[in-house]
Image (cartoon, rainbow, N blue to C red):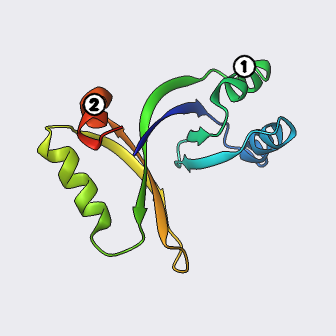
Amino acid sequence: MAIRREFKLRLPNSPGALGQICQNFADGKVGIQALSLDPGGTLRFVVDNPLHAAGLLKDQQHAIEERDVLLIQLPNEVGALWKATRLLNSAGVNIEYAYACSLDAQPMASVVVAVDDIERASMVAGV
């Protein structure tokens, strides 16, 4: 587990809105590590260079929110996510939301987890 900076912003419901963000990051050499886009247009994402990403977004007049989240690398196997959530639960840490991705052929999966107490979660995880 590692603590990472997550950004949140609202995208308009129009063709190309997400593509524009992706192009801005590509042009600025910012790599997207994880993202989630819900039907209401709320985009959450973690990038490899949060300071540069924040500047690019502000330059494009995006109102952004930031928070620390856990980025968890897990074995891509049955029960791995349960073990991670059990660890957080045992410390009394509430999971507010999460998003993840795994591919069948890959040995590891990535999960972004937003919690109510990042300090306690990181202590339990040894981050």
Answer left or right for 24 relative to 38.
Answer: right
Numbered disc 2: secondary structure: loop
Asked whether 54 or 13 is in front, the reply is: 54
Q: Tell me what residue is drawn at x 12 percent, y 45 percent.
A: 90
Q: Quadrant of residue 84?
A: bottom left
Q: Quadrant of residue 2?
A: top left
Mark 2 and mark 1 lie on one chain; the one further toward the N terminus is 1
In three-dimensional space, the C-alpha distance between marks 2 and 1, rounded to whole angstroms, equals: 26 Å
Q: Which three-letter amino acid code belongs to the residue tagged 2? A: Asp
Question: 10 Å neighbourhood of mark 1: few (<14), some, or many (≥20)?
Answer: few
Q: Position of residue 112 (x, y in %)?
A: 44, 47
Asked whether 68 or 22 is in front, the reply is: 68
As drawn, 60 above or below 19: above
Marker disc for residue 105? none
Q: Position of residue 44 (x, y in %)?
A: 54, 40
As drawn, 125 above or below 76: above
Q: Tell me what residue is drawn at x 20 percent, y 50 percent.
A: 87
Question: 10 Å neighbourhood of mark 2: few (<14), some, or many (≥20)?
Answer: some
As drawn, 24 above or below 67: below
Residue identified by numbered label 1: 58
Q: Tell me what residue is drawn at x 32 percent, y 30 percent.
A: 118
Q: Position of residue 106 (x, y in %)?
A: 54, 74
Q: Tell me what residue is drawn at x 18 percent, y 54 percent.
A: 86
Numbered disc 1: secondary structure: helix
Q: Which three-letter amino acid code belongs to the residue tagged 1? A: Lys
Residue identified by numbered label 2: 116
